[in-house]
C-alpha cells in the first residue's frame, strides 16, 4: 500500500500523525510541503478526495491569509488554490493519502479511516 503524508516536521499534529502511521507499520512517503508544495493538479485532486472546498483546507488564522486578502469571498477556487501553492503555509496539515482517499490528521486518528 502506498501512503503519502504532506508533513510539516515543526507541527505537533503532523508529527503525531506520522508517529501513528509508523506505529501501524506504515512507512509513508513524506512530502515536506513547505519545501515542496503540491502542484495545482495535486492540490485539486486532494481537495476532491477530501470532499472540501479550497477555503475549508486553508489555515485562515495565519497572518498571510489576511495579508493577502484571502478572506475576500469573491475569490474563485482557482485563485484560492493558487494562493495555497504560492504560500503553502496556508494548507492545513497533515494530509495523508492512501487507497485513493485522503484525510486530514486533525485529530491524527482521522487518517486510520483510509488505511
Image (spheres, helix red, strand yellow):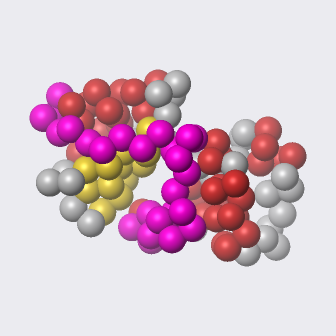
Question: In this view of the protein, which residue sits in the foreground, 35 or 47?
Answer: 35
Magenta residue span? 23-49
Q: Residue at x 12, y 35 (%)?
A: 25
> Horizontal and vertical percent for residue 42?
47, 65
Question: Residue 109's image quarter?
Answer: top left
Question: In this view of the protein, which residue sits in the foreground, 74 or 2?
Answer: 2
Does any portion of residue 113 appear in the rendered image? no
Q: Is residue 8 left or right of residue 103?
A: right
Question: Residue 59's image quarter?
Answer: top right
Question: Residue 69's image quarter?
Answer: bottom right
Give the farthest residue toward the front: 36
> Horizontal and vertical percent for residue 31?
42, 44
Q: Is residue 114 left or right of residue 31?
A: left
Q: Is residue 107 left or right of residue 19?
A: right
The relative height of residue 50 versus residue 29 in the rendered view (above or below) is: below
- The quarter of the image holding the N terminus is bottom left
Question: In this view of the protein, which residue sits in the foreground, 51 or 81?
Answer: 81
> Horizontal and vertical percent for residue 3?
25, 50
The relative height of residue 1 versus residue 43 in the rendered view (above or below) is: above
Asked if the stretch drawn in magenta spans residue 42, the answer is yes
Amino acid at each position: 500500500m502506498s501512503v503519502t503524508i504532506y508533513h510539516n516536521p515543526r507541527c505537533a499534529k503532523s508529527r503525531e500523525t506520522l508517529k501513528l502511521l509508523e506505529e501501524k507499520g506504515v512507512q509513508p512517503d513524506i512530502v515536506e510541503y513547505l519545501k515542496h508544495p503540491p502542484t495545482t493538479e495535486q492540490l485539486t485532486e486532494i481537495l476532491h478526495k477530501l470532499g472540501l472546498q479550497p477555503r475549508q483546507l486553508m489555515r485562515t488564522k495565519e497572518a498571510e491569509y489576511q495579508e493577502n486578502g484571502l478572506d475576500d469571498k469573491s475569490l474563485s477556487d482557482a485563485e484560492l488554490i493558487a494562493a495555497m501553492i504560492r504560500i503553502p503555509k496556508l494548507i492545513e496539515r497533515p494530509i495523508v493519502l492512501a487507497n485513493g482517499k485522503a484525510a486530514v490528521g486533525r485529530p491524527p486518528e482521522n487518517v486510520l479511516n483510509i488505511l
